[in-house]
Amino acid sequence: MGFFEAHVLQNDEVSAGYALLSLGGCDALSGARPGQFAMLRGEWDRDPVLPRAYSILGATEGRARFLVKQVGRGSRLLASAAAGVRVTVLGPLGNGFPSASPGAGPDLLVAGGCGLPPLHLAAIRATEGDTPGAVELLLGARCAAELPHPLLEELGERDVAVSLATEDGSDGEQGLVTDLLERRLAAGAAGRVLACGPTGMLRAVREVTRRHRVPCLLSLEAEMACGLGACLGCAVEGRDRKYVHVCSDGPVFDAEEVWP
Amino acid sequence: MTDVGPRMEVRALGLDFANPVLCASGTFGYGREFDGLCDISRLGGLVTKGVSLEPRAGNPPPRICETASGMLNSIGLENVGLRAFVRDKLPFLRDCGTRVLVNFFGETLDEYVRCAAGLSGQRGVDALEANISCPNVEAGGIEFGVDPQMAGRLVERVCGATDLPVVVKLTPNVTDAVPIARACVEAGAAGLSLINTLKGLAVDARTGMPRLARRFGGLSGPAIKPVALRLVYQVAQARLGVPILGIGGIMTGEDAAEFLVAGATLVQVGTASFTRPDAATRVADQLKRFCQEHHPRLDDVGQLVGTLR
């Protein structure tokens, strides 16, 4: 883990409101596990003052990628940063998804909206290595225009089976990604469910996996200032009503460890 | 490399500081979180996350939100408590190569006194910083730091319980900070840190919800620098005879120089450490360069202190 200066290589709008940000000079991120994140901040003097936490979409040969959803001033600035703009990076941070125990059956990956990056990386990693297995990813979005097609194409090239759900039915099945998950688990077992997305979706994913008695790991997001466990701003209530911290205890938690 | 520029060492609180730049409480954890990211041995010093007698769980989330040129926080003073601090956090601080001020607080006079006493005599603690912006549960929840009498009585009791120099961190959320500062010094404070965060509110007008679960939070960051400079200057003008530790939105060496000119002997870098973990050492380096460039005749950085015309 380190703090270093990177620079924008490329910044493309990949779907409505989403930019695919590529940074050069990120060799320190190449070993990142799916689910680990980095704090990014451009060279914007004093405002916005805080960096932003982004899940690492992968890093090879010093080039790291992030999916930036434009929600406020900080993310808009990052999404519109031109090639060459300097960005400070703190990372890789957090725990990431733990490896599956051998013989546990394949992971089922579930993503909602901007929650795709850790699962995209998990899918890519699963197709590599000595024993590449079949990988399945369920992705939900509000509408077809929000789907990041370049990332989906990369998954297709690796023969990752992707099922889509959109709330308005403009692509894939009409409905929620948890509807897909419900049907998928009813049809057959999975080793674990790994999920990332909005909090409401993650709670629903937990309900479905509980019903089907499948172990579930969730990658959470929270407002965060330091990323290091120092400011204690990113607290989430844990199972025993004690607070856990998304940056230093997570961002990946066993679904039964959070939200009493 | 020949060493040019002013002497950066500062003598204050009966201690030698390598330079006037410290890390502020609550923004630098217990130091170890920044190990390898910030060269702690090059800091003037660091002020720990606030410690209380017993561990505290802190406030429900959301606890932070960003605002224009700053942020609001209501962490709720979450901390590991005195015993775990001494056992688990202090060993790293003992050998970290910089001055360590331990920030502490309580909800009653007795808690403050017992916490101060428990920190005294601990190797690795160079000074204490009392956070007096806490509600006094024995006085209906009014903050200790908003009333000169209450603040004075607290500081007197704390100073009586320890041989360490006690710095008092003052709240800006008062009409006039000078009488409170004076009461603290008369009660034995060895120094004054100012300012703590400004009380604020952020609203989500779309949902009608406050952005923080506990509604109000403390504003920090560059947004508060002019308020902090004004208070540092006002308290410095009262010539109370103790050093001032200036805090509030310092991001650069020039910001630090402004605080020295206004009357601070030392400064603390807070929110900027979130912007980049090495912010405080950068501020120290920049301060030296700033002096070389703009005050080339300066022998000693201390000569800048209180020079506002």
Image: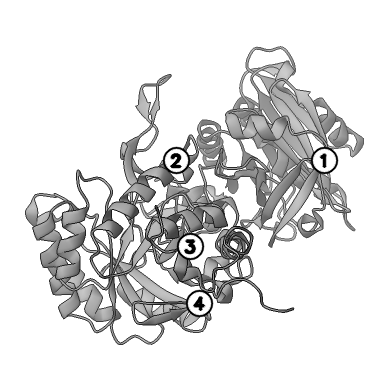
Mark 4 or 1: in front is 4
| Amino acid marked by disc 4 | Glu
Instruction: Tell me, yes or no, whether the two marked residues, 4 and 1, touch with CB atoms within 8 Å.
Output: no
Secondary structure under the numbered disc 2 in the rendered image: helix
Q: How crowded is mark 2: few (under 14 residues within 10 Å), some or many (20 or more)?
A: many
* Three-letter amino acid code at the position of disc 3: Phe
Image depth: mark 2 or mark 1 in front: 2
Mark 4 to mark 2 CA distance (whole Å): 29 Å
Residue underneath mark 4: B9
Q: Which of marks 3 and 2 is nearer the N terminus?
A: 3
Above-or-below relation of A204 to A99: above
Residue B307, position as x, y percentages in the image: 41, 59
Image mark 1: chain = A
Q: Which mark, by number, is residue B28?
A: 3
Both labels 3 and 1 in a single chain: no
Please check whether the numbered discs 4 and 3 fall on a single chain: yes
Identify the residue position indicated by label 2 in the image: B223
